Image: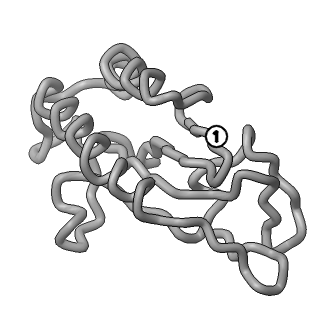
């Protein structure tokens, strides 16, 4: 089922963002973070520049300021998954090493209901497991190896 990007963003904001808020995530679309005393859990939506699909990446950052390899300091409330080199792209095929994109236009598109179901299941399982089992480790040179 073909949808516009604006329609998909609206559906995500209605169906998925409240779930993230219930999980204590803050931020605004497309970047969300959950600050804790030990780490910052991150989730970012990224839309393809060619249209028709998006991916969701999760990462774990420090609970204090993050320093990029070029020396820029980013405070936790501004940190995004894209700032970190270590991140996981979630989706139904990501366990098989696939680079998963949620497709909403074209021949491989799925219904909006199926897309949201796959997305919420991926957050519930893959993202939660990643945040729970991944610990942020700063680089020894004091600068973090970001994307």
Instruction: Please tell me in which quadrant of the rendered image residue 120 appears.
Output: top left
Residue 93 in view, yes or no: yes
Q: Position of residue 7 (x, y in %)?
A: 33, 18
Question: Would you say 15 lies left or right of 13 here?
Answer: left
Q: Residue at x 34, y 25 (%)?
A: 16
Q: Position of residue 45 (x, y in %)?
A: 46, 41
Position of residue 79 relative to residue 11, above or below, is: below
Q: Position of residue 84 (x, y in %)?
A: 62, 63
Residue 9 in view, yes or no: no
Q: Residue at x 46, y 48 (%)?
A: 49
- The structure's colour scheme is one colour
Position of residue 30 relative to residue 71, above or below, is: above
Q: Residue at x 39, y 47 (%)?
A: 56
Q: Nearer the viewer, residue 40 or 114?
A: 40
Q: Nearer the viewer, residue 88 or 76?
A: 76
Local SS, label 1? strand
Q: Which residue is mark 1?
A: 35
Instruction: Please tell me in which quadrant of the rendered image residue 23 appears.
Output: top left
Question: Would you say 81 lies left or right of 72 here?
Answer: left
Work out which quarter of the rendered image holds the C terminus and state it: bottom right
Q: Residue at x 25, y 48 (%)?
A: 125
Q: Nearer the viewer, residue 116 or 139?
A: 139
Work out which quarter of the rendered image holds the N terminus and state it: top left
């Amino acid at each position: 089922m073909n949808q516009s990007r604006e329609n998909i963003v609206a559906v995500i904001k209605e169906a998925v963002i409240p779930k993230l808020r219930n999980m204590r995530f803050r931020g605004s679309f497309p970047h969300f973070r959950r600050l804790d005393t030990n780490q910052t859990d991150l989730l970012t939506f990224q839309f393809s520049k060619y249209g028709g699909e998006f991916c969701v990446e999760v990462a774990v950052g420090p609970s204090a300021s993050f320093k990029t390899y070029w020396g820029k300091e980013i405070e936790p409330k501004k940190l995004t998954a894209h700032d970190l080199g270590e991140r996981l792209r979630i989706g139904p095929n990501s366990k098989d090493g696939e680079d998963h994109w949620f497709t909403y236009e074209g021949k491989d598109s799925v219904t909006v209901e199926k897309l949201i179901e796959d997305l919420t299941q991926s957050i519930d399982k893959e993202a939660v497991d990643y945040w729970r089992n991944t610990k942020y480790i700063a680089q020894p040179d004091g600068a973090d190896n970001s994307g």
